Image (cartoon, rainbow, N blue to C red):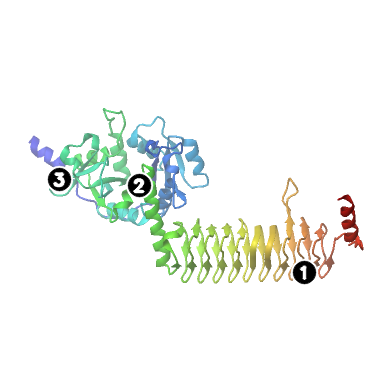
Amino acid sequence: MKASKRKKTMGQRRPRAAQAEAAPQVIVLAAGIGSRMRSTLPKVLHRIAGRTLLDAVIDTAEGVSPSRIITVVGARRDSVEASLSGRDVTIVVQDPPLGTGDAARRGRSALSNGSGPVLILSGDAPLLTSATLTKLIERRRENGLDLAFLTFRPPETGDLGRVVRDAKGRVRRIVETGNATARQMRLPEANAGVYCFSSEALSRALGKLSRNPVNGEYYLTDAVEILTSSGGAVEGVEAEDWREGWGINTRAELAAAEEIERRRCLERALDAGASIVDPATTRIGPKVRFEPDAVVHPFVCIDGTSVVEQGSEILPFTRVIDCVIGPGAVVGPHCELEGARVGPRSRVGPFARLRPGTVLEEDVRVGNFVETKKAVLRAGAKASHLTYLGDADVGAGANIGAGVITCNYDGEKKHHTSIGEGAFIGSDSQLVAPVTVGKDAWVGAGSTITRDVPDGALALSRVPQKNLEGWAARRRGRKGSKS
């Protein structure tokens, strides 16, 4: 009778029928110290492809449309919390650090009540994709599982937890390296630290976790054996690309992950129809979007949420962050653009800087050594040389000469300059804001404008020129007498 009863307990329950369910909730474990990084910076705040490891994981989680994301922080939590400012996440603190099981328990306490699945992710696995998470969620739902967790087969399993299966290939448990036998250490399948629980099974498993007798921590990996030993339905789903399960623990691994993510981003750009002249020297962020026939030259960095539209071109040694480069526009070389919109067929550079809030409409020309900030240049406007346009609106077809400055800052506040359609601003002029130069108005070269200029008027503020006849000869004579 005892053997029969044990056999019934060890057998997995029959999977429940798949049915519609609520959106998943997510717990991201980001409380680790990361001592092997040899850094004062928390491990999850190290960066690949322009974003932190933690941001990469949260971005992936957002790709499965969760109803809520909980981030569990611990070591050096002030800086981690600061990095999450503006993100739609709930922060939970784990203090003292008592392992992944304790962290998951704390995250679970912050989840809303509901029957939907719960994803638990590691904050140091930046190569995980939303597609793989979706596959894991669907596997759990379709097979009516208590738990589906991600496994992978890295080239070197090292100190990763091993997935132990029975003779029929069914998952029995995850064994940590400190507790593994020599035979188990040779198992090629490792735990990726990515779990999709049913809400009920998670609560049940967390309630039965016990402290590890060696270090006093609670291991989330023990949840697998807790569920399988009580007849729970558990499956390990192997990642198609082993790199998705890779957690970053050292600088060398961080550098390797950077190269992998960089290559992924390049491949997405190429698949979208962009031409990357020299992939080896081009850096593209994971959120950058390309349209067909965009061209990117060597030594270009494009990051943030930038969009490079059809037929545009970015020339060498240029950096673009959170920008829209319109169709047929040309940028560079040696330019820096951040938070700007470059309109169709506009040209920027070389050696130009467009700061946040800059908008160039169609056919605008911004030339060498021109800087803009919160400036709108309307269709066909030109600022070709050595100019600063800050907090300004430049009308369609206006021409800004070399050396023009909008003096927008009075030491306390920023002020606005408005330049009308078709206006001409002569070289080496200063427009002291707040000021308006009217439609078709002219400002003579070398003027300092402190009052509004009416439509069609000419404004001058030069000191009258004075010529001293024979002055050069007299000067030479004075020098000769002294010698």
To which residue does mark 1 refer? 439
Asked if the residue at tag 3 contacts the one at tag 2, i.e. Cβ–Cβ closer than 8 Å, the answer is no
Q: Quadrant of the N terminus?
A: top left
Secondary structure at badge 1 equals loop
Tell which residue pokes out farthest to the front in this image: 483
Q: Mark 1 or mark 3, which has the lower sequence index?
A: 3
Image coordinates for residue 184, horizontal then vertical, percent: 18, 41
The reply to whether discs 2 and 1 touch (Cβ–Cβ < 8 Å) is no
Question: What residue is disc 2 on?
Answer: 119
Q: Select label 1 or label 3 by which is in front.
A: 1
Q: Identify which amino acid the numbered label 3 is placed on.
A: Asp
Residue 448 drawn above or below residue 100: below
Dot 3: element: loop
- Near mark 2 (Cα within 10 A), the count class, few <14, some 14-19 or many ≥20, is many
Residue to which mark 3 is pinned: 166
- At 49% from the left and 58% from the top, the residue drawn is 301
Q: Quadrant of residue 353?
A: bottom right
**Amino acid type, label 1:** Lys
